[in-house]
């Protein structure tokens, strides 16, 4: 999301005068679509590591405690993914957009 938003900000944002938040929103759209397209990759990777799905009955899966743990796990995965993605902020050229605006 960050790389895509930065790319959009430095290209389309400069060309058409988009606000940085608009570029960030387009980056978020890209990130969400990518997550939908590659969602099964994580499960396949986990299966390749030998991790298997819990052996639970339908009744056990419908318990409030099971649903809470599943939600907590999903939220933790999203947070970890975002933190890993944010590590790109250390590599961004923050003055690139201003230099491009000066050349136009």
Image (tube, helix red, strand yellow):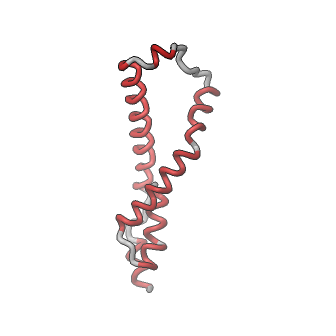
Q: Residue furthest right?
A: 48
Picture residue at 61% right of the left edge, 25% below the top: 49
Q: Is residue 32 above or below residue 22?
A: above
Q: Residue furthest bottom?
A: 104
Q: Residue at x 35, y 64 (%)?
A: 21
The image shows a total of numbered marks equal to 0
Q: Is 17 drawn above or below residue 6 in the view shown?
A: below
As drawn, is 55 to the left or to the right of 61? Answer: right
Above or below residue 95? Residue 46 is above
Above or below, 82 relative to 103: above
**Residue 12: x %, y % from top left:** 47, 73
Q: Quadrant of the C terminus?
A: bottom left
Q: Quadrant of residue 95?
A: bottom left
In this orientation, which residue lies closer to the viewer: 62 or 86? 62
Between 35 and 97, the one lying in front of the other is 35
Q: Quadrant of residue 66?
A: top left
Rendered location of residue 45, percent (x, y): 61, 32
Q: Nearer the viewer, residue 34 or 79?
A: 34
Left or right of 16 in this view: 52:
right
Which residue is at a point 40% across and 83% down the rendered structure image? 102
At a point 45% along the width and 59% down the height, the residue shown is 27
Write down the quadrant of residue 18 in the picture: bottom left
Place of residue 103 in the rendered image (x, y in percent of width and height, measured from the top left): 44, 85
Residue 79 % position (x, y): 39, 39
């Amino acid at each position: 999301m960050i790389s895509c938003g930065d790319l959009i900000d430095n290209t389309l944002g400069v060309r058409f005068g988009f606000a940085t938040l608009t570029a960030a929103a387009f980056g978020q759209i890209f990130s969400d679509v990518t997550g939908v397209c590659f969602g099964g990759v994580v499960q396949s990777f986990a299966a390749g590591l030998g991790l298997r799905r819990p052996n639970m009955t339908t009744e056990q899966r419908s318990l409030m405690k099971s649903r809470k743990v599943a939600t907590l796990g999903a939220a933790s995965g999203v947070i970890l993914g975002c933190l890993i993605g944010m590590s790109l902020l250390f590599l961004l050229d923050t003055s690139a957009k201003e230099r491009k605006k000066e050349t136009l």
